[in-house]
Amino acid sequence: MPNPTAAMLVIGDEILSGRTRDANMYHLAGKLTEAGIDLVEVRVVSDDALAIIAAVKSLSAAFDTVFTSGGIGPTHDDITADCIATAFDDHIDVRDDARALLQAHYDKNGQELNEARLRMARIPDSATLIDNPVSIAPGFTVQNVHVMAGVPSVFQAMVASVLPTLTGGAPLLSETLRIDRGEGDIAGPLGELATEYSDLSIGSYPFQKDGKYGANIVIRGQNAERIASAMTELKGVFST
Amino acid sequence: MPNPTAAMLVIGDEILSGRTRDANMYHLAGKLTEAGIDLVEVRVVSDDALAIIAAVKSLSAAFDTVFTSGGIGPTHDDITADCIATAFDDHIDVRDDARALLQAHYDKNGQELNEARLRMARIPDSATLIDNPVSIAPGFTVQNVHVMAGVPSVFQAMVASVLPTLTGGAPLLSETLRIDRGEGDIAGPLGELATEYSDLSIGSYPFQKDGKYGANIVIRGQNAERIASAMTELKGVFST
């Protein structure tokens, strides 16, 4: 049975303007691979309601699971929760369960649960909350979409909260061989190996270091024996 | 007049499996912002022909300019050029101008222009070549799509070759103020400022450092005076 599929939607002008380098995609990609869930597409869109709504609808329809990152804080530019409600034609307002979490948190810290912070309790009616052990304000899940924060430490905590609730497949295994020759020298035999092992994914990732060319050959699949066999053959071809 | 719009398509299993952290998006985003071109969407898809073709068609139709990254090397998993040809219903084969570039390069280095390397001269009929001063094998442009390498040093060189050929708009200017208070404390006044300066984009990017919360407030726009005015007001509000 093929693995479940996933997509990620990164929401934020700061990524598209080059101000911030996204860290969440890399984190999620690694965690999903471990869990046996295939991350098939990532989209990055700006803090624009129509763009967010269209992307959520499209990805939710096309993949088993969708993860979003960003735009669920207390400031005016945090519009993700409202966009999710619109995308799923759901009602949204401050919800008692989310408000109670925030109230307890701010009471404990002697801070006021003001109007801005209360925005973080705006959750669509049909959603279930995602635990946020870092800063309490919850993420939430509507249908197959998990809505999570953009701050990396909070995003990572929410991923850890969500992942055990998902059914994964067979973890994707991989082995890598670094070959210090240009891709043009290795492409022929590599293509033949890829044809022979068509049940595996054999990727070549070229690099240039100190003026010399090389490539990392990554063999991926779910069957450790097949990967080991292909790797033995690969080493045999390029040991000379 | 609004700035031209752009999208980026990152092609590569290695990003989606979490093996490699993408560096090209961050680079391109910064360069486009300097040039006054608005990067509106980024998509990452795997080395899958149907996914690449669909994404290229969709992004090419929706935005003024599209940049792709990855999958134009000599190995079996480099399928981008063929996908671009399919997307634009164009014929593709080894082209004499690209072959001549490669032949001269490999002759000079005493290497053979073998069948694998010749794959890098496969260019759609209607394309113009993109100069690659790093490793010679050219990128290419079909209609509004610029097809570039995934290796960061080569990608960056190709971006430098393409950018001067594009018409940009007014560069996006920005100023940042770091405020060492949680977003919940600053969201109210910040929202009022955003309403007052609705011609500017005012973003709040929260962070957590050493257990304390803060936010970088970024004011973006094309009018330096308006940005300065908003920044003065912002500092006034949060100086107390």
Image (spheres, coloured by chain):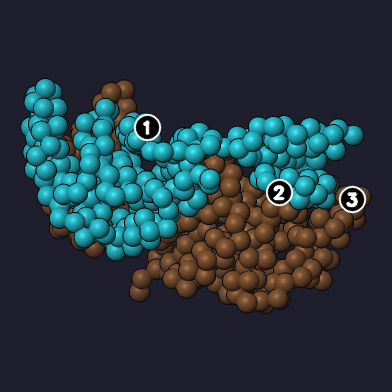
Chain colours: A brown, B cyan
Q: Secondary structure at mark 1?
A: helix
Cα gap from disc 1 to disc 2, whole angstroms = 32 Å
Q: Quadrant of the N terminus of chain A?
A: bottom left
Where does residue A119 sit, x and y in percent of width and height? Answer: 78, 60
Q: Which mark is residue B164?
A: 1
| Looking at the image, residue B84 lies above or below residue B175 | below
Mark 2 closeness class: few <14, some 14–19, many ≥20 residues within 10 Å:
few
**Given contact means CB atoms under 8 Å apart, are the residues at marks 3 and 1 in contact?**
no
The reply, left or right, for residue B17 in relation to residue A134 is left
The reply, left or right, for residue A106 in relation to residue A167 is right
Pick whichever of labels 1 and 2 is earlier in the sequence. Answer: 1
The amino acid pointed to by label 1 is Pro
Where does residue B56 sit, x and y in percent of width and height? Answer: 34, 56
Q: Which residue is mark 3?
A: A111
Residue at 55 percent across and 49 percent down: it is A24
Front residue (pair B35, A84)? B35
Cα gap from disc 3 to disc 1, whole angstroms = 52 Å
Q: Are marks 1 and 2 on the same chain?
A: yes
The reply, left or right, for residue B147 in relation to residue B75 is right
Q: Secondary structure at mark 3?
A: loop
Chain identity of mark 3: A
Mark 2 vs mark 3: give the one in front: 2
Where does residue B69 sit, x and y in percent of width and height? Answer: 35, 45
Q: What residue occupies the far front of the structure in this picture?
A: B1
Q: Is residue B3 visible?
A: yes
Q: Which mark is residue B198?
A: 2
The amino acid pointed to by label 3 is Gln
| Looking at the image, residue A27 lies above or below residue B50 | above
